[in-house]
């Protein structure tokens, strides 16, 4: 049998496999819609824009796992998340790729972008689709990586993408992923609260500038905030296993925000006589409010909290502003005399 005959037979088999794949795609879409799971592939351009990916570097020819390919540059609407074909018009091309894949010739490598642990097809969507239908686990690819500290996963939903985008905006503003590249991700259950977290860092920046008598960059402030405010708070949260008292959907950063907000509310109510001034004090209050036993060791914690410094410096700023207001303005008096 000639090569052409083999190709025609493989092509006919490909047509049959395509029809089967199309049927799977239909039912997969129905099931995912009912379960509220993502149906389409992720759009690489949207991911790149939303996660603010700027740099890229070629990583060479690699064997990559097919189940980690979750998106496409331009054809993300033409396949399901499992790379099943959705359009009947794709039949002939898909079948030809199938025929080539099952021939002695095989398929050339595809081209992909890598973001985190996931891949997006730049060229070779049909090859990925066919390879998955043939039961392959890996495929050869030219890989170009776009580095990010944002955590991604194959079943990422649109809502999770919104969360990732909010965190990416926070990182771009603070540069925390650059100045502390191995930091533990600051996850929030409500993406809108990244604005509050950013506000904490800018407040910290103002306080540091007042103490230093000079202007600081946001990167300097983020480093100092992370090392001297956030990370010590996180250490106490983990030391006393505080997350066991919260709903599983809540995060350590959620609790951090609650603690800082609580300390601010206590100070606003009691002033400088506030009974709770440290993170450990706020943790004690947190447990008391929920009727939980408070460990004696937690009561004795002598954590050097920057929250106390915040209140002191804010008061100093207020006193300084009051003094400026109370001082007479010589220029204004002179103008009055002239008049």
Image: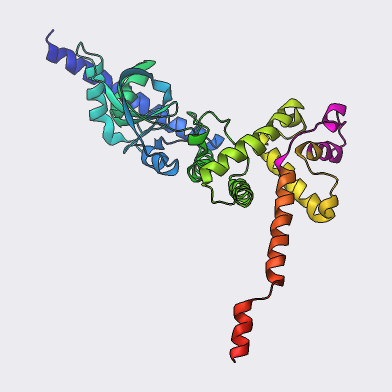
Say if residue 337 shows up in the picture.
yes
Please report the residue visible at 43 percent of the width from the left and 31 percent of the height from the top. Answer: 81
In this view, the residue in front, 208 or 91, is 208
Say if residue 133 shows up in the picture.
no
Q: Look at the image and give the residue range highlighted in magenta.
A: 283-306
Q: How is the image coloured?
A: rainbow
Please provide percent x and percent y for residue 246.
74, 34
In this view, the residue in front, 32 or 295, is 295
Please provide percent x and percent y for residue 218.
52, 46
In the rendered image, the vertical position of residue 267 relative to residue 20, given as above or below: below
In this view, the residue in front, 185 or 321, is 321
Q: Quadrant of the C terminus?
A: bottom right
Q: Quadrant of the N terminus?
A: top left
Please report the residue visible at 75 percent of the width from the left and 31 percent of the height from the top. Answer: 242
Please provide percent x and percent y for residue 175.
49, 40
Quarter of the image for residue 318 reads bottom right
| 298 with respect to 92 (left or right) | right
In the rendered image, the vertical position of residue 195 relative to residue 144, given as above or below: below
Quarter of the image for residue 92 reads top left
Please provide percent x and percent y for residue 27.
45, 31
Number of marks in picture: 0
Quarter of the image for residue 40 reads top left
Tell me if residue 51 is in the magenta stretch.
no
The outermost residue toward the top is: 1
| 284 with respect to 121 (left or right) | right
In the rendered image, the vertical position of residue 165 relative to residue 335, given as above or below: above
Tell me if residue 303 is in the magenta stretch.
yes
The outermost residue toward the bottom is: 339
């Amino acid at each position: 049998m000639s090569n052409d005959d083999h190709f025609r037979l493989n092509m006919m088999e490909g047509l049959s496999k395509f029809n089967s794949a199309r049927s799977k795609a239909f039912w997969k879409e129905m099931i995912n819609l009912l379960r509220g799971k993502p149906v389409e592939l992720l759009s690489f351009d949207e991911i790149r824009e939303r996660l603010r990916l700027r740099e890229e570097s070629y990583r060479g020819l690699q064997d990559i796992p097919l189940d980690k390919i979750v998106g496409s540059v331009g054809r993300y609407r033409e396949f399901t998340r499992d790379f099943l074909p959705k359009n009947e018009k794709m039949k002939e091309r898909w079948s030809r790729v199938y025929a080539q894949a099952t021939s002695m010739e095989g398929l050339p490598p595809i081209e992909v972008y890598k973001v985190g642990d996931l891949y997006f097809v730049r060229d070779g969507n049909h090859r990925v689709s066919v390879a998955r239908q043939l039961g392959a686990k890996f495929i050869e690819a030219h890989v170009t990586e776009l580095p990010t500290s944002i955590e991604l996963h194959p079943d990422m939903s649109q809502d999770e993408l919104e969360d990732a985008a909010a965190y990416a905006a926070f990182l771009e503003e603070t540069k925390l992923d650059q100045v502390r590249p191995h930091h533990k991700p600051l996850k929030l259950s409500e993406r809108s609260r990244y604005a509050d977290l950013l506000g904490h860092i800018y407040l910290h920046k103002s306080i540091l500038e007042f103490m230093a008598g000079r202007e600081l960059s946001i990167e300097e402030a983020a480093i100092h905030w992370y090392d001297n405010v956030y990370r010590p708070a996180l250490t106490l949260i983990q030391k006393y296993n505080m997350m066991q008292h919260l709903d599983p959907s809540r995060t350590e950063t959620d609790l951090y925000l609650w603690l800082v907000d609580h300390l601010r509310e206590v100070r606003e109510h009691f002033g400088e006589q506030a009974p709770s001034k440290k993170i450990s004090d706020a943790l004690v209050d947190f447990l008391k409010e929920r009727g939980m036993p408070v460990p004696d060791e937690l009561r004795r914690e002598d954590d050097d909290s920057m929250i106390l410094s915040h209140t002191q410096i804010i008061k100093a700023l207020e006193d300084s502003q009051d003094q400026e207001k109370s001082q007479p303005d010589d220029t204004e008096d002179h103008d009055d005399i002239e008049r």
